Image: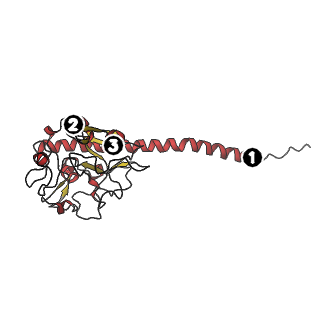
Amino acid sequence: MIRRPARRQGFTLIELLVVIAIIAILAAILFPVFARARDKARQASCLSNLKQIGMALNQYAQDWDEAHPGVWFGPVSRQPWSQPSDATTFYKWMDAVYPYVKNEQVFNCPSDGVNKKYVFRNNDKSNGYGSYAMSQAYYRVGDPYTGPASDYNQFVSAGQPFVMRLAMVQAPASTVWIVDGGVRGIKNPDWKSYEFWWYDPNEINTAFPTIRGDSPRYFQNIVERHSDMTNVIFCDGHAKAQKLEHLTQRKQVGNHQIMTAFTIEDD
């Protein structure tokens, strides 16, 4: 009787190493693709949030004689401006437009690992203000004005904060309103992630004149959270992704360097 040789079981070491090498190569190729796809999905979700907020902002304006919501609401002084929201006196632009969206999650970017989640009419400093910041390029606290007399009527009325109205914005489709915001260490205290502001409305590039950081890059309180892009709401309510280089473009007007994306004039 002729015996057949026993069948070999398993793989040789060489075969295992070849399989492992193939898997490693495929992983090296596919993981960055998956990461980019995930980031694109998060960017799309964030952009959807901003589109809803943009519609809510314009609904608010229609209900309030075409006035933009203020960055904060409360008594006219600098001290309340530095207070967190509460249920009655002090509240922020997100709280003003929340009734038009009725969803706290809309104010949270899925790629935001810095800011705490938004809480409506937050009355606790430990709670959050969400992921998005509003421009204060033309918004002054209503303290006694000490700037140039020529700027008084334009930027602040007697004893009251400046109120922006739709008709004042000459190029709404290119004027920045809301951005991906919140850079750790920029705002003091950190919960003031809801706004980004400039020291001088006539020269609004003086506070943070350059793009900073490696990953993510940021400019003032504006951050590139999505594949080196920043999601932006413009004053006509539409939203799209932008590079910081586009947002920081400047134009010489007289003796001033004007940042055209943040000025209401048709630059």
Residue 235 shown left or right of residue 212 in the figure: left
**Structural distance between the alpha carbons of marks 2 and 1:** 65 Å
Q: Which mark is residue 14?
A: 1
* Residue sitting at x 35%, y 54%: 183
- Which element carries disc 1, helix, strand or loop? helix
Q: Which mark is residue 78?
A: none
Q: Which mark is residue 172?
A: 2
Which one is earlier in the sequence, the residue at label 2 or at label 3?
2
For the C terminus, which image quadrant?
A: top left
Relative vertical location of residue 29 with respect to residue 127 in this rendering, above or below: above
x, y (%) of residue 23? 62, 44
- Which element carries disc 2, helix, strand or loop? helix
**Residue type for callout 3:** Asn
Q: Which mark is residue 231?
A: 3
x, y (%) of residue 242? 34, 39
Foreground mark, 2 or 3, reads 2
Residue 79 shown left or right of residue 128 in the figure: left
x, y (%) of residue 230? 35, 43
**Residue type for callout 1:** Ile
